[in-house]
Image: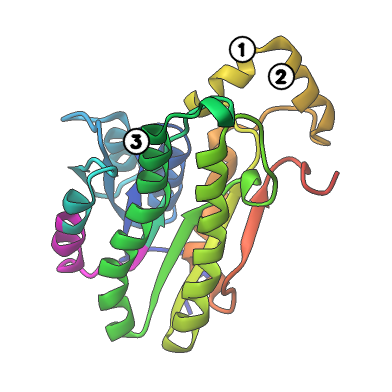
Amino acid sequence: MSAPFDLTGRTAVVTGARRGIGMAMAVGLAEAGADVIGVSATLEDDPEVGRLVRAAGRSFEGRRCDFSDLAAVEDLGAELAERAPDVLVNNAGTIRRAPAVEHPRAWWDEVLAVNLDAQFVLTQALAAPMLERGSGKVVFTASLLSFQGGITVPGYTASKHGVLGLTKALANEWAPRGVNVNAIAPGYIATDNTQALQDDPDRSRSILERIPAGRWGAASDLAGACVFLCSSAADYVHGAVLPVDGGWLGR
């Protein structure tokens, strides 16, 4: 019997893989044995994530896709569905910060398109061969703001609440057909998306005071949770949202 966390022979599609959490997840999956197809709107010709995946002894293929362009996402989904991947990690996302009364409609539309609409479109496409095969793993990147309201990020909060609901809705349909759909909710992770908070002394201090672990998370803290949910160790886990937050929600 193979080890429960062994992903050897499996192919994983990871969106938002160029840096930060997505890169850490892609590398973690590769270290567990998976070959990786990494997707990002700004992926370089020889990206760091590709070098790290290959250093782990696995193959890497890169794809560029603008997730605010749903037609492009549909094209990507059609192409990748022909590969019948075993794993889809929906990590691509964006955030726009402005007080709600001043929040531009264009920002709202962009955030919802990238963080929710594109996730559904791509998952529809790649789930089809999984359902036909009777096995597959889908993991969404949710957020602490799937549970809370946040400040000056109305579009982001709405989208991440939607991701949580979508995770549960798809799990309800697809669990009987052998496809696991779950989500990870990162806490305050030191990435580009949280740079404005890290740079604000008052906000950074108030955040750290609430985190029981006493530190900002690192992108690498998400890798193990991702491997677990993409492995046979999680075969009976459906519709779960796993916080990786240093204890924030428990506080």
Q: Which mark is residue 204?
A: 2
Q: Is-magenta flag for residue 79?
A: yes
In the picture of the structure, the residue carrying the numbered disc 1 is 199
Q: Estimate the x, y position of residue 159 in percent, counting from the top left.
A: 50, 49
Q: Estimate the x, y position of residue 9 in percent, counting from the top left.
A: 31, 66
Mark 1: which secondary structure?
helix
- What stretch of residues is rendered in magenta? 75-87
In the picture of the structure, the residue carrying the numbered disc 3 is 52
Q: Are marks 2 and 1 in contact (CB under 8 Å)?
A: yes
The answer to which of 219 and 114 lies nearer the viewer is 114
User: Between tags 3 and 1, which lies in front?
Assistant: 1
Q: Which mark is residue 121?
A: none
In the rendered image, the residue lying farthest to the front is 101
Mark 2: which secondary structure?
helix
Q: Is-magenta flag for residue 43?
A: no
| Picture layout, residue 96 above or below residue 25 | above
Residue at position x 52%, y 57% from top? 162
Residue 251 in which image quadrant: top right
Residue 124 in which image quadrant: bottom left
Q: Estimate the x, y position of residue 155 in percent, counting from the top left.
A: 50, 40
Q: Amino acid at mark 2?
A: Ser
Residue 152 in which image quadrant: top right
Q: Estimate the x, y position of residue 154 in percent, counting from the top left.
A: 56, 38
